[in-house]
Structure formats: C-alpha cells, structure tokens
Image (cartoon, rainbow, N blue to C red):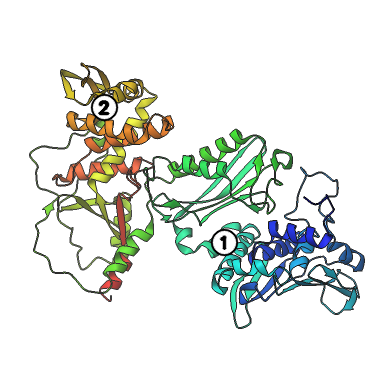
Amino acid sequence: MNSIRLLSPTLVNQIAAGEVIERPASALKELVENAIDAGATRIDIVMIDGGKSYMSVTDNGKGMNAEELALAIERHATSKLPEDDLFNIHYLGFRGEALPSIGSVARLTITSKPKNSLEGWSISVEGGIKQPIRPAGIPEGTKVEVKDLFFATPARLKFLKSTQTELGYAKDILHKLAMMHPEIAFSLSDDKRQILKYLPSSTLRDRVSKIMGKDFEENSIEVHGEHNGIILDGFIGLPTYTRSTSTEQYLFVNGRCIKDKILSGCVKGAYQGLMGHGSDGYPVLALFLKVPCHEVDVNVHPAKSEVRFKDAASIRGLIVGTLKNALAEAGHRTSTTIGIGALGRSSSGIIPHSPRRSFTTAHLEIQTPLELNDSYSANVISTDSSFTPVQASQSKKSVETDMKEDFPPLGLARAQVHETYIISQTPDSIIITDQHAAHERLTYEKIRAGINNKIERQLLLIPEIVSLTEEETNRLLSHKEELEKMGLLIDSFGLDAIVVREIPAVLGDPDIQKLIKDIADTLLEYGAASALEDRIQALCAKMACHSSVRSGRSLDANEMNALLREMEKCGTSGQCIHGRPTYIELKLKDIEKLFGR
C-alpha cells in the first residue's frame, strides 16, 4: 500500500464532476440554475449532438467582472452564501462549484459583462488547465460554452446514450426549471432548429399548462394549503387522469425539483382509495412547497435532488390533507380524455358486425327493485323513457336554455343498455355510466364513513356458518377487531369454520359464503405486515364489490336517476374503487364531428 498523499486539484475536480456531472443534462442544469440565480429574464440554450459535443447557455443576468470571473472557476467560491450558513440558502446552485468540475472534464469558456459596464471578459478552462482572462465583446449578461464534454475522461463517454436520449434528459431538466420560473423566457435549439420556446407567463398555471399540455389543464385541480409557515401550491390531476409511470409527477421544494420518498408517499396517501390497489396508473401533478430555510436541509445529495425535512410529519399532514380536500371538492368529475379517446377510436367509421342485442328502456319495470335508502330517494327527478322531441318552431337557443335549467350535472337517465350501462342526457353531451362501478364506489364510501361513526349493522336472524381451512380461520379471527369496525361480526366455530352474526346494513343481502372467503384471500394478499390503512381500504373495497348493483340488473327510471343524483353528491364517484372511471361523457360537438356535421 502506498503512502497517503494529497490528490491534485485537477483530479479532485474530476471526482467532483463524477458526482455532479453525470451527463450533458446535469451540466445544463447547473448552468441554467446559475443563470436563474443571476437574475436573468431570458435564457437561451444551444445543444449540438445532445450536448456531448457542444452546449451553450446565454443569459441577460447581472454578469461578472474580471475579478469575479477568475474566482468563478475556483473550487468552493460562491456568491450565494453571504452569511456562511448552509441552512439559509435562497439560491438554486453555488456558482463556482459546478464550473470547475465541468472545466476539469470538458473545454469550458465563460464570457460575461456586468450591467452598466463598458467591458466584457472571457476565461477558458480545458481539462482543468486554466487560461488567462482576456477582454471580449458580449451584451450584458453571461454566456457559458461547454465543448467536448468528458474529453478529459474518455471512459465516461461510453456511458452516454444516443443523441436523442441525451436531448430528452436535457428537455426534462429544462421543463422542471421553466415550470418553477414562469417569469423567465426559455429557448432550446440545436444547430438546425428550435426545439423548445417558452415566453414569459403571467401565471404559474399558464406555464404549467404549456409544459404539461391542454389535457392536464382541463383535468387538473388547483390546490393551496398553509400550516406553520409552510405553503403548498400546485395542480393535481383527477384520479382517472393518469400515466403509466411517475415521470409526470413534479415535486418542488423551495424552487428545486426533487425526488423524495416522503413526498411521493404523501401523494400515494392522498389518492388512496381513489385509484385502487395495484393500479398501473400514476397521478399527474405539479406541487410547489415553500418551507422555511432552517426547516429543510438541501445539502444531503451532491446534485441537490433530495432533501431532508426537520418536521416531516407536518409536511405529510399538510400535503395529504390539502390534496384529499381538493379531490373531494372536485366532486364527481372524471377525465375528459376518456370520452375523447373513445370517440377517437371510433372515428375510423368502421363499425364491427355483431348480432343485434336488445336494450332495456328506462320505463321497463323490474321484478326485484333496487333497494334505495332515503338519501337515494330524495330529489329523484322522474323522466319519460323516450327522448323528448323538440318542436320545430323552437329555437336552438331556447331549447338549450330550458335544458340547462332542468338538467342536473350527470343528466337525466334516458335508457339502460345491455343491462349494464345507464345512458343519460345533458344540455351538451351524452353520459354513459357503469351502474356496477358507480354503485360500488358509493357503497365503499358508506362503509368507510361508518368505520369511525359506528356503522349500522344488520343482525342475521340465522347466523351463517362458513367452512374454511384452519389457516383461513385463524387469519380472519386475527383481524376480528378490524372487521368489527366495518360492521362485520364474526366468531370462532371450531378449528375450520367461523360464524357470521352481523354484517354492515349497507351490504343488503350479499352472498355471505363468498364474501367471507374473498375477505380471507384479501387478508392473505396484504399480510399482517401491511399498513392498517391499506388493509382497511382493501377490505372495504371487497365488501363494496359484493353488495353493489350488478351488471345485468335491469333498473327503472327512478332507480337510474337516484343513482346519478347520489353520484353527484359523492365527491369521489368519478372513479370506482379500482381506479377506473364510473362514467364517460361524450360531448355533442365531438359526436357531431363523427357524422361530419
């Protein structure tokens, strides 16, 4: 083993570059953050070959004089810690910390001119070797050029991806920075074309919508919350507006886009019960958290992509509470993209051949009526089963006015097709509701609400004995207290059976044998180690599924309208307990396009 020695400054900078500068996008992040901290209102970026061969960042910020420029490429030199307090950071990066790291592995040139100055200056660093400062002509601001990234450490080059992939990483970084700073204009170009351009936005919502798209704007809810000096703002997607990955979950803390297990857990907790266990989708959102500087440590990761909170419990409470309230206040809304997508798939005009099937109109009576409680029966709007014809003498405007006055949000039931879907009409759309999914959500919410409010139970005149395996019996009895809170009272009946004495009244007349066996399977899936809230959610969902109006059940007009009115009063009725939509809305204007009207 060799004796201990100090590493050379160039090698130290290359090691630092390995921690901070992983790829061109990492260097871009540091340079753009420096421009933002310099007070720039316009930042122009050029990247050739995905930034591997060339990138430049030009800003109109405060600029640097010759002395500051010389210090900027030294390690541990910064203008961002005026009080030498690492817990009082009001900037994104440390100008001078990333720059020597970039200069140690690439050919770096910085040209800058302070505001109200007649002179501009330039300095270069190539593979850690500094060149003398020289005069240069440049408008007020700073331009940083990086050529041949990793030429001094060629082993790093083989880990870089294709040009398009590296450019994609850079665009993602720019999206995050542009989202946090709507007042700044951003542009990204290569040597042939302009790739991105964001003009200054007057509001945060405007900038977020431009980055995340019109669909997100139409299917998101604005949120705001405050607690103990912590402020949360942002926009969250409806539970039925999801993505297959979490890449469109943007979480910002004091202006930094971060990845944090606590914040990700908060999002999961807020949407719990709305997207279903094991759902393949992830909610889409952009959240902006402002925390007092001394309440958060941003220096726990070299790239500052992680943070540590002093009071994580307060953060969690604020986020989960704010998001849950916003989702509840959104009412029964469901994603508009579902209906548009359905129409899009039908726009080819090809109608598959299938045998004719009858449908049940709303006035048909059923032998076993749906049991509705008082809340279902209240404010039921009766309607004729047929579509009401409009007199030719009536103007379109007067008809629309009458409809808007008489039609509730989810419309009036007009028919039931395939004994599964309720067709209702609104002033400007047709709504198709999955009766089983909708009633399942309503039942689930009643069971959940009753857990803390002594849910109403139904005493079985003849207790039901359910035969099980010894393992299933022990599993159910070990969760007896949890089940009792949900209105299900069970007792032991030998080694391989249980007796069911009471069930939640909201379940009606379920198949108790199948219900108990399904609950035993659900408990096996989650196990004793699962969080209590997860188990309760799964058990409530299982019971709700057994008690809901089944597909294939004929409903009359009053029953269908009662179901729609109850959905309008339930803030989570837009999605079933598995995270799927309970209804889709087809706008009349979109339907007319299918027919070329």
**Does residue 26 appear in this view?**
yes
Residue 206: numbered disc: 1
Residue 350 or 170: which is nearer the viewer?
Answer: 170
**Mark 1: amino acid:** Asp
Residue 463 in the figure: left or right of residue 172: left
Q: Which mark is residue 472?
A: 2
Between the C-alphas of marks 1 and 2, the distance is 55 Å
Instruction: Give the amino acid at mark 2.
Output: Glu
Point out the residue furthest to the front here. Answer: 1
Is residue 482 shown left or right of residue 384? right
Residue at image coords 70%, 38% = 295
Query: Which x, y percent locates residue 146?
Result: 73, 72
Q: Residue at x 75, y 53 (%)?
A: 91
Q: Nearer the viewer, residue 538 or 141?
A: 538
Marks 1 and 2: which is nearer the front? 2
Residue 378 marker:
none
Q: Is residue 479 above or below residue 122?
A: above
Relative placement, left or right, of 424 versus 147 is left
Kind of element beneath mark 1: helix
> Where in the figure is residue 100, as x and y percent of width and height?
79, 63
Helix, strand or loop for disc 2? helix
- Visible in this render: residue 428? no
Tell me which corner region of the image, top left, top right, bottom left or bottom right, holds residue 60.
Answer: bottom right
Q: Position of residue 161 (x, y in %)?
A: 56, 69
* 10 Å crowding of disc 2: few (<14), some (14-19), many (20+): many
**The C terminus sits in image quarter:** bottom left
* Image point (81%, 53%), residue name: 80
